[in-house]
Amino acid sequence: MTIAAPTQLDLQKLAKDHLWLHFTRMGGYQTEDVPIIVRGDGCYLEDANGKRYLDALAGLFSVNIGYSFGEEIGQAALDQMRELPFYTNWSYAHPRAIELAAEVASLAPGDLNRVFFCSGGSEAVESAWKLARQYYLARGERGLRGRVEPGARAGALEPEVDHDAIVAAAGSQHRYKAVARHIAYHGTTFGALSINGIPAIRTPFEPLVPEVRHVSNTNRYHRPPDETEEQFTRFLLDELEQTILSMGPETVCLVHMEPVQNGGGAYTPPAGYWQGVREICDGYDILLSADEVITAFGRLGYWFGSERYDIRPDIVTSAKGLSSSHAAIGAVITTDRVMEPFLGQTSMFSHGITFGGHPVMCAIALKNIEIIKRERIVEHVRENEQAFHDTLAQLLELPIVGDLRGVGYFYALELVKDKDTRETFSDEEAERLLRGYLSNALFEAGMICRADDRGDPVIQISPPLVAGQREFDEIVGILGDVLSEAATIMR
Ligand SMILES: Cc1ncc(COP(=O)(O)O)c(C=O)c1O
C-alpha cells in the first residue's frame, strides 16, 4: 500500500465535509470528486491524481508570471518575514509599502501617482467608489446636488428606487452615484457588487448600495451589421451621456469601467470610445475609474490597459497581476489632483483595511514586478499577441464559434447556435452546452479555461503571460476537439 492513495482519499473527504468553494454548485460534489490541484510549473497545473492541465486561465486571469517563480518569491517573503512580518499602513509607513507605491506609480501611465493598498480586487473597487464619494465632500461640494425631474428618468434602463429620498432624509446631499456597464464583473463586496452589471449575482443581495446605473458594454458582435464603428462609438457615448443626465450629473461621482471588459468575453473598445468617455467625465466633472484588476501588469501587452487605450483615468483599481496572485494584495492608484483635497491639515480619506499594504504582500509584489521586468514579460506579450490571435483564429472555422475577440493575452470565443444569423443559444441550451458538457469536457481533456454564460456563451482564454506558441497550439488543439464535439451534441 502506498501513502499517496489514502492521503488523496482523505483530502477528498475533508474537502466534501468542510470546504465551501466560491461560486460553486456544491451539491454536485456529493457524488463527483472535488477537483484538487496540488502543484504547478510554468503554464501547467497538476491535480491530486497526478494528471496535468494546461492552465489557459492563469488561475483567475491573474498568475501572470506562471507557476515557476514560487521559490524566488518565497525567498522574498521569507526575508520580509524575518525583517518585519507585519505592520500597518494606518498612520504608519514601512519600507516595502513605500517602495511598492513608488514602483507602481512609476509604472502607471500619465499623472497616476498615489497608491492606496488593499487586499484584493473587490476591496480596490470598494475603495475607489468610497474615494470618489469622499473626494467631492473633501473638495467642499456638499449641498451642490440639484433636483432631478421625475420625467428625466422615464427612459432609464433599470428599475428605480427612490434613493434621492433616502439621501435627502439622511441630510447628506452630495455626489454618490456611479455608472458602470452591463455584464461587467467588479467583485462581490457590497459596493463592488452594486457596481457589478451581472443581474444573477446582484439580485440575491438586493437592496444594494445606492445607486448605480448600467450602460451598454462594447459588445459589437450583436449590433446591426451595417453599423459602422464610428456609429457604434457614437451610440455608446450618447447613451452614457443621457444616462448621466437622467441621474442628475451633479449627483454622480464615478464612472467605473474596464479597459477591455471581461464579463461577456473580452469586449474591446471601438475607436474613439475612451476619448469620448473621458470627455463626458470631464464635461460633468465626474471621476473616471479604470478597473484594471485583470488588465494591469501585462495582460494587454502594457503595464496598464489604460496606456494601450490612452484612457487617462483619475483612478485605477488593480489586484491580481500586481503580485501575479502570489499574495493577497490590491491597489487603488490615483492622481495628485484626486489626493489634493485630502492633503489639508485636518482632512483624511476615512477608509482603511488591516491588511492593506501588508509588508510581506508588498515584498511579494515587488519581487513579482522585478521578475516581470527581468524576464521581459510585458514585451513578450506584445511580441506574441498576434501569433496568439492568429492561432486562436483557426477555431473560427468551427460551426459553433461565431466570434473571436480580445487583445494581448486576453481572448474570448463566442459560441453560437447559428453562425450566419449570429443567433445565440437559449438559457436551457447554454446550460446544457456549458455546464452539461463543455466545462467537464475541457477539464477531462487536460485544459482549464472558463466556459461562461454571464452574457452570451463564451470560452474565456487568458493564460499566464509566459505562454508561447507551444501553449497556443495546445489550447487550439484541445478546444478544436472539444468544440467540434460540442457542435455535434448541440445539433
Ligand atoms: C475587473 C474585476 N474587478 C474586480 C474583481 C474582483 O477582484 P477580487 O476577486 O480579487 O475581489 C475582479 C475579479 O475577477 C475583476 O475581474
Image (spheres, rainbow, N blue to C red):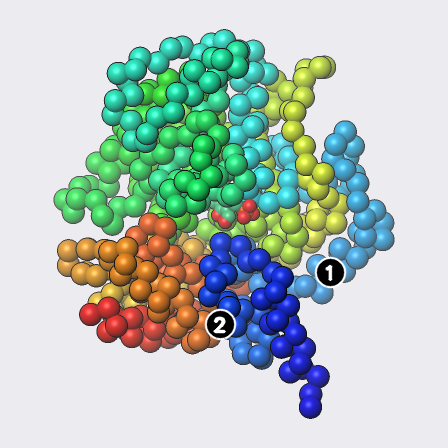
Q: Is residue 262 left or right of 110 when viewed as pictured?
A: left
| Residue 78 or residue 446, whichever sits in front | 446
Real-space CA distance between mark 2 and mark 1, rounded to the nearest whole angstrom: 34 Å
Which residue lies at the image location 30% right of the left edge and 15% below the top edge?
150
Tag 2 secondary structure: loop
Mark 2 neighbour density, 10 Å: few (under 14) some (14–19) many (20 or more): few
Does the beta carbon at disc 1 come under 8 Å from ligand 1? no
Report the amino acid beneath label 2. Answer: Glu
At mark 1, the secondary structure is helix
Q: Is residue 469 above or below residue 153?
A: below
Q: Is mark 2 within 8 Å of ligand 1?
A: no
Q: Nearer the viewer, residue 467 or 422?
A: 422
Where does the image place residue 346, in percent across and percent down from the top left?
71, 15
In-image side of 203 versus 333 (left or right):
left
369 or 93: nearer the viewer: 93
Question: Can I make out residue 251 in this image?
Answer: no
Measured from the top left, where is residue 341 in percent x and y? 61, 18
Q: Nearer the viewer, mark 2 or mark 1?
A: 2
Tag 1: amino acid: Gly
Residue at 47 percent of width and 39 percent of height? 205
What is the quadrant of residue 356 in the picture? Answer: top right
- Quarter of the C terminus within the rendering: bottom left
Give the residue at mark 1: 74
- How many discs appear? 2
Residue extending furthest toward the right: 82
Q: Which residue is mark 2?
A: 32
On-image quarter of the N terminus:
bottom right
What residue appears at the point 52 percent right and 36 percent down from the top-left corner? 190
The residue lying at 33 percent from left, 20 percent from top is 245
